[in-house]
Amino acid sequence: MNGLAAATTDALELLIAGDAKLFGIVGLSLEVSLSAVFLACVLGLPLGAAIAVGRFPGRRSVIVALNALMGLPPVVVGLLVYLMLSRAGPLGSMGLLFTPTAMIFAQTILVVPIVAALSRQVVEDAWQEFHEQLRSLGVTRMGASITLLWDLRFSLLTIVLAGFGRAAAEVGAVMIVGGNIDGVTRVMTTTIALETSKGDLPLALALGIVLVAVVLALNAGAYVIKEAAERRYG
Amino acid sequence: MCGWLLTISLLLSSAQAQQRFITVASTTSTEQSGLFGHILPAFQKKTAIQVRVVALGTGQAFDLARRGDADVVFVHARGLEEKFVAEGHGVKRIPVMYNDFVLIGPQTDPARIGRQRDAAAALKAIESAQAAFVSRGDRSGTHTAELALWAQAGIDIAKQKGAWYRDTGQGMGPALNTASSMDAYILADRGTWLSFKNRGALAILVQGDQRLFNQYGVILVNPVRQPHVKQADAQAFIDWLVADDGQNAIGSFKINGEALFTPNATQAGA
């Protein structure tokens, strides 16, 4: 456990030294993963709510598929996005391979199923409880899904954070579509993978601790905001 | 989908200013040894062209270039490089520098390969002792060199490998980590070894054999095949690499006073 103690000290030193390069990497990690989570919410929350209140043929299969997609391997998503964005691929002419945009795109694909599948469950539970009430008020299914999403916003926050956790922690997809280019597409997880490759295990571990600390701080912030908002609007 | 991607791009437009850049597909040995970090700032300062290095195994680097995702390939497997050019994917192969491979193993040396020069004899000893050997197994330049050495040792490794031969499918660093944790023999390029920190009980056992010579070459991806290749900027990078500026920068890259690569762009037949 000596290694862990030393790595923790190293991590603190890295943070205190305020290394501009490290902050750049942390900043890019946050930019990519937060953008991906934002896009995944824009797509996934309405999708989850629509499936929750909707009745259509094949609904059960869609739910099973969506739940299964939560386990998408990042490497596979990375490979698919790579083949799509590669010059020889269908979207190659956009020249987006090895850019942060490509990384956001890949992580969005990873996070959408998590946001959609989990929000579907939460909204469906609430829908079963309140749908007669909502129906008697003459609310359409569309209106109901919007109402429920809004009413459940504090519960949904945990889902959003789960999605962020997935995005911030994955390395397989961003490594392939970003290329781990120094100063351009190098994020926390790919830096950790690189330092591990170089055999600098203490530095890799220290960077890992920095990553966990950043994710922790973000979660703590979200929790505080949620508490405050609940007290005010609860 | 296009629209969506464009939206993301626009969201990020501030972050992605119109920086002039080229993409270089290179090997893990050049990136992880720190060579690029040492030489690229000088080139970028002189030309304002940013060099974006994607570090892969040599085989993967060629795949990337064949798909049109790189402007320049900078690798170490002469046979594959010449094939790449002959097939019309690259314009011309230009030698840049060399270092050498070293045969690394546990200091206890269970296969008794000794500190000799004959790399093929050493591999033969490892095979007959059935001592643990870690292979890259990833079609990289180092893997290609390893396979050639087995052949020179008269061993058909595809047929004769047993549980002692661990095919890891990993980059140089991760493969060294594996060898270090299981006290296995491994062929590595000297550059990565010198900058590698998690050595454990491993040390260089065999070096200096002519067959361990490791030449690096640079190739411009054929702009006729891949029209979006940034020909002028990519050529500027290649020209810089093989001219005095680049060659001196390569030669001055040292770790613990030891030079990792020897520039030899002017050497005939390299």
Image (cartoon, coloured by chain):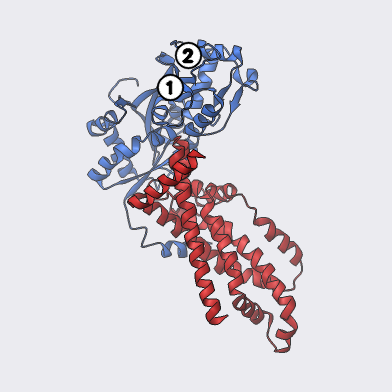
Chain colours: A red, B blue
Task: State which quarter of the image contains the C terminus of chain A.
Answer: bottom right
Residue assigned mark 2 = B119
> x, y (%) of residue B55?
44, 39
Q: Distance between the residues labelled 1 and 2?
A: 10 Å
| Residue B188 in sight | yes
In percent of the image, x 48 and y 11: which residue is there? Answer: B114
CB-based contact (under 8 Å), mark 1 and mark 2:
yes
Q: Categorize mark 1 by other alpha carbons within 10 Å: few (<14), some (14-19), many (20+).
A: many
Q: What residue type is labelled 2?
A: Ala
> x, y (%) of residue A20?
33, 52
In percent of the image, x 40 and y 50: which residue is there? Answer: A12
In the depicted view, which residue is nearer to us: A73 or B47? A73
* Mark seen at residue B101: 1
Vertical order, A175 against B195 (above or below)? below
In the depicted view, which residue is nearer to us: B12 or A20? A20
- Mark 1 and mark 2 lie on one chain; the one further toward the N terminus is 1
In percent of the image, x 32 and y 53: which residue is there? Answer: B19
Vertical order, B177 against A8 (above or below)? above
| Residue A92 in sight | no
